[in-house]
Amino acid sequence: MKDRLQTALGSGYRVEKELGGGGMSRVFLAEEVRLGRRVVVKVLPPDMAAGVSVDRFEREIQLAAKLQHPHVVPLLSAGSSDDLLYYIMPFIEGESLRAKLAREGELPVAEVLKILRDVLDALAYAHRHQVVHRDIKPDNVLLSEGHALVTDFGVAKAVAESTGKHTLTSMGVALGTPAYMAPEQATADPHTDHRADI
């Protein structure tokens, strides 16, 4: 996969290594050569990408890319090549909330409140711009330099909306992480809205 991704990205990026991944993507660390900055490239799994309309995927990602907020990890770019669909974000130094909880266990109340304030600030901003996350979980909250940042905004919706006329939710397929889903999202209700993020 690394070699295929490097071919898809061309000479503008140098793919360094795979960082891991989950149900929605495989994650790679890369360098944007011209600017000399590290980025994260997330690639949709081939089985998920196979049913996706590239144009609609890129349009939905473009909407999410308009989010500019201190607690939102921005989307820098998105693209496709052969059967690869990917999107690019800045590399954030730090760790996920999931990693911090695994390492430290229960967090002090003051720290929890600070994290929640940052996450809710990001969600409120996105919701004002008609973007619903649909996959809020500790893995998608990054902690860096005393701040919480929400990552992967709009990605679940981009996948759902890009499948053409029949979205995955309208076909009864729930998108997101089951343990963190709102009940209406778990039942693949096509009318799931911003309230599912709270």
Image: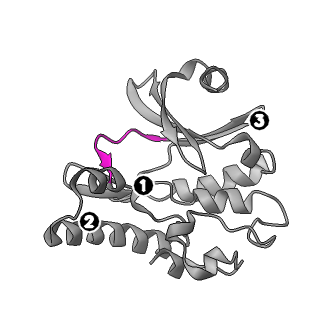
Nearer the N terminus, badge 1 or badge 3? 3
Foreground residue among 117 and 67: 117
Per the image, the residue denoted by label 3 is 83
Discs 1, 2 touching: Cβ within 8 Å: no
In the rendered view, tell whether residue 16 sits above or below residue 72: above
In the rendered view, tell whether residue 73 sits above or below residue 1: below
Foreground residue among 18 and 5: 18
- Image position, residue 91 (x, y; %): 39, 38
Magenta stretch, residue numbers: 89-96
Dot 3: few (<14), some (14–19), or many (≥20) neighbours within 10 Å? some
Foreground residue among 195 and 139: 139
Residue at image position (16%, 72%) is 109
Q: How was this image coloured? A: one colour
- Tell me: 154 left or right of 172: left
Q: What residue type is labelled 2?
A: Ile
Q: Which amino acid does label 3 sit on?
A: Asp
- Image position, residue 22 (x, y; %): 55, 47
In the rendered view, tell whether residue 191 sits above or below residue 52: below
Residue at image position (44%, 54%) is 151
Nearer the N terminus, badge 2 or badge 3? 3
Q: Which mark is residue 115?
A: 2
| Circle 1 or circle 2, nearest the eye | 1
Per the image, the residue denoted by label 1 is 139
